[in-house]
Image (tube, rainbow, N blue to C red):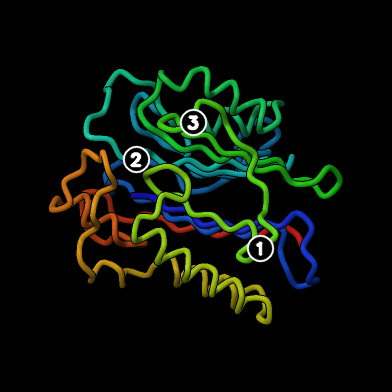
Amino acid sequence: MCIIFFKFDPRPVSKNAYRLILAANRDEFYHRPARAADFWGSNNEVLSGLDMEEGKEGGTWLGVSTRGKLAALTNYLQPRLNRDARGRGELVAQFLTSDMDSLSYLKKVSAEGHLYNGFNLIAADLSTEKGDVICYYGNRGEQEPVVLVPDPRPPAGTYGLSNALLETPWRKLCFGKQLFLEAVERGRELPRDALVAQLLDVLSNDEACQTRPLRPRAGSTCDPSSASMRLCACAAQTTAPGPTRSSLWMQTGM
């Protein structure tokens, strides 16, 4: 049950503010083979972990490139998977190595979304000259991708994404997003290393696991008494079926 929190402001007013802060957990079976984050691709321009599962080799869940590209993916929780579907990790890897801008790429992906099991994909072009552009597409939601625009009202440009559509108010998302915002606000007065430590604390928090199970949304096929639904309450997973294997933070520019 992966989770991503991010806050972006292309033109921060405060000199101590970052244009983008992102914190993410990857929850996956321990036995699924993967490579640790490292540089790869043409001229070693991409930094990411790599999936090494047979038939899915080379895909990834989150990465950045030296050309200012960023992409992150979560799976969409669904009752049954199509075993013949294409590997979703290729969507991130292909964007990071392509010459397409984020919106054009997601429009292309939206036309091919039926070839994959459920997913959410964030794609971004980060540039101090042209301005930052962050886009989102989920193949279980609207047909067209959207460009995310920071809301001028607090908390400006802050989003959470788990295993439903962007900003779906699952408990772990709402709970974790509040912790994330508090850490970011405190971080304005802290050195970078202290902010990083606070973000990692957010990602390792399992307090919400001690509360009652989630209630499913209308039309949900998930059983609220099931183990998978109970695990939806935690920002960090410590037990099967998919424990947290890695946590990541990222900051872009001041």
Disc 2 on helix, strand or loop? Answer: loop
Sequence-first disc among 3 and 1: 3
Sequence-first disc among 2 and 3: 2
- Give how far across and how far down residue 126 sits, in percent: 73, 45
At a point 66% along the width and 73% down the height, the residue shown is: 192
Q: Which mark is residue 144?
A: none
Looking at the image, the residue that sits furthest to the front is 218
User: Mark 3, residues whose alpha carbon is within 10 Å: few (<14), some, or many (≥20)?
Assistant: few
Q: CA distance from mark 2 to mark 3?
A: 33 Å
User: Mark 2, residues whose alpha carbon is within 10 Å: few (<14), some, or many (≥20)?
Assistant: some
Disc 3 on helix, strand or loop? Answer: loop
Residue bearing mark 3: 142
Residue bearing mark 2: 33
Which label sits in the foreground, 2 or 3? 3
Marks 1 and 3: in contact by CB < 8 Å? no
Which label sits in the foreground, 2 or 1? 1
- Give how far across and how far down residue 119 sits, in percent: 42, 34
Q: CA distance from mark 3 to mark 1?
A: 25 Å
Q: Quadrant of residue 11?
A: bottom right
* Residue kind at label 2, given as amino acid type: Pro
- Give how far across and how far down residue 49 sits, in percent: 49, 44
Q: Nearer the viewer, residue 244 or 141?
A: 141
Q: Nearer the viewer, residue 116 or 145?
A: 145
Residue bearing mark 1: 153
At a point 52% along the width and 59% down the height, the residue shown is: 23
Location of residue 106 with respect to 168 vertically, above or below: above
Image position of 169 (left or right of 29): right
Looking at the image, the residue that sits furthest to the left is 225
Image position of 161 (left or right of 109): left
At a point 71% along the width and 40% down the height, the residue shown is: 125
